[in-house]
Amino acid sequence: MTQLDELLLRELGPGIVSMDPDLLRDCSHDESEQEAVTPDVAVTPVDPLQVEILLRLAGEHRFFVTPRGAGTGKSGGSVPVCGGVSLSLHRMNHILEIDPENLLAVVEPGATCESLQQAAWAAGLFYPPDPASLATCSLGGNVAENAGGPRAFRYGVTREYVLGMEAVRIGGHRFDVGHRPVKGVSGYDLAALLTGSEGTLAVFTKLIFKLIPQPEAPGLLILYFPSVHEAVRAVTILVQNRLFPMALELLDRPSLDAARTETFSPSSSAGGALFCELEGLAASPHLAQAVLDALAGAGAAPSGYELTTDPDAAGAAWDARRDVSSRLKALHARKISEDVAVPRALLPELVLGVREIASELGLDSACYGHAGDGNLHVNFLTDSDGSAFGTAVERLFRLTLLLGGTLSGEHGIGTLKRRFLPAEHAPAVLDMFAAVKHAWDPAGLLNPEKVL
Ligand SMILES: Cc1cc2nc3c(=O)[nH]c(=O)nc-3n(C[C@H](O)[C@H](O)[C@H](O)COP(=O)(O)OP(=O)(O)OC[C@H]3O[C@@H](n4cnc5c(N)ncnc54)[C@H](O)[C@@H]3O)c2cc1C
């Protein structure tokens, strides 16, 4: 037993501190290509006080702490790359309060996104953020990554729903930031700063979210186009026609092939498809006509479409969409996935560029995701070795920045995109990032080697 193990066992107790090899292995990786690193010890608190004690000890004894939600991250954020403690919040998973009068929820950080959606819905309310990992990912991880999802197109990303939080800094100081009213301009907006901070500034122990009224029951209109290029061009046409569906998701041909299941059979001839989720469509199927008319009016009519008002059939299609990433992985020996975002009108240039990069490097590619937000999951795939992946990703990032885009729409920088950050941000901006980190965590003990 190491000195660190002894110290933590003495201060926090064996129910909270674990050296169990299975748990340490679970905490060693996330869902990205980041190589696994096993932590020295795992701490699984059930109470904010235990987080406070751990971070006080970390400050005093100078050991590293890496916060962890459910480990579904796609950028290496919860991998304890410097060893030390993996602080896994999965046991702090209660929905503490749903307030139907003030339209808010208070939750512990380890609760899943889906559990909040369900609790809100049961109270007649709606929590829109819907990362495809919603059944397993934690709300703490969602806030740390400022997670998006298909419905971000209409409703915005996690940030739009964070009213405030309780958090703990290295040194063990616990504090509240933000507010319960939907408005508040009192001092610097530290809740906004912590949202998207990838676990590098503080650890969330409680979160306050805004809820909204439930929408009318949606339905799904799947629009098929001869080419992926035409599918992404349709996104801008819909927006120009002031049509803002609840979700507007792209699947290119390889993604449609991967999405095929026993309960979801997409067109086998289309070059690309848009999943267009429309509020009220379940009761009023004629609402689909406005979308079809707008596209026809711009000379961009789809080559076919499917209208799904049955919730089970729509659910099967959405499940298939959510599984594209894992099915692409199963279909190829190697896969690398990025999540760049560009101004949405430039999506056609992005998808053409991806094809060019892949074909010049002898790779396959698949693009799918949140086309309404200009945010695509670009996958390079191969059945041989992945030695061309590095060049492909560098060229993809260069193209993205040339188009005025950003390296990550929703998965964050973590470990995997750190070295590319200077390509997007000026040295003076990187200095400001470093100054923020230094102000919160001067010794660099919280989630080291991430983002910066
Ligand atoms: C199949 C699949 C589909 C996905 N789809 C989407 C999608 O549609 N949209 C999207 O945005 N993402 C998506 N993701 C990525 C991932 O699910 C999100 O980034 C999610 O927010 C991570 O949550 P987590 O609980 O798994 O966090 P983890 O992976 O455990 O951690 C992520 C980061 O959050 C930090 N963190 C975790 N908890 C806390 C806390 N309490 N306090 C402070 N920091 C903390 C960690 O240190 C780490 O930096 C997908 C992933 C998979 C595997």
Image: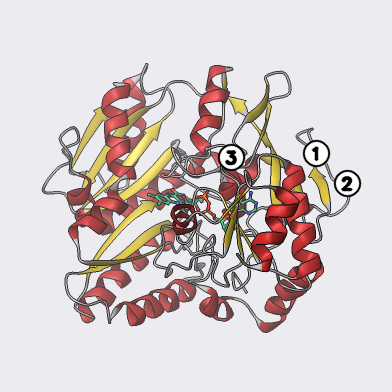
| Label number found at residue 91 | 3
> Circle 1 sits on which residue?
179
How is this picture coloured?
secondary structure
- Give residue 63's position: percent from left, percent from top: 69, 69
Percent x, y for residue 198?
61, 59
Alpha carbon separation for disc pair 1 and 3: 25 Å
Res 100 → quadrant: top right
Residue 435 percent location from the top left of the image? 77, 74
Q: Which residue corresponds to the image point at 80% horizontal and 39% vertical from the top-left?
A: 179
Amino acid type of the residue tagged 3 in the rendering: Arg
What is the secondary structure assignment of the residue under circle 1? Answer: loop
Which residue is identified by label 2?
Answer: 186
Between 142 and 276, the one lying in front of the other is: 142
Q: Are marks 2 and 1 in contact (CB under 8 Å)?
A: yes
Residue appearing at x 77%, y 44% in the figure: 49
Left or right relative to 151: residue 205: right
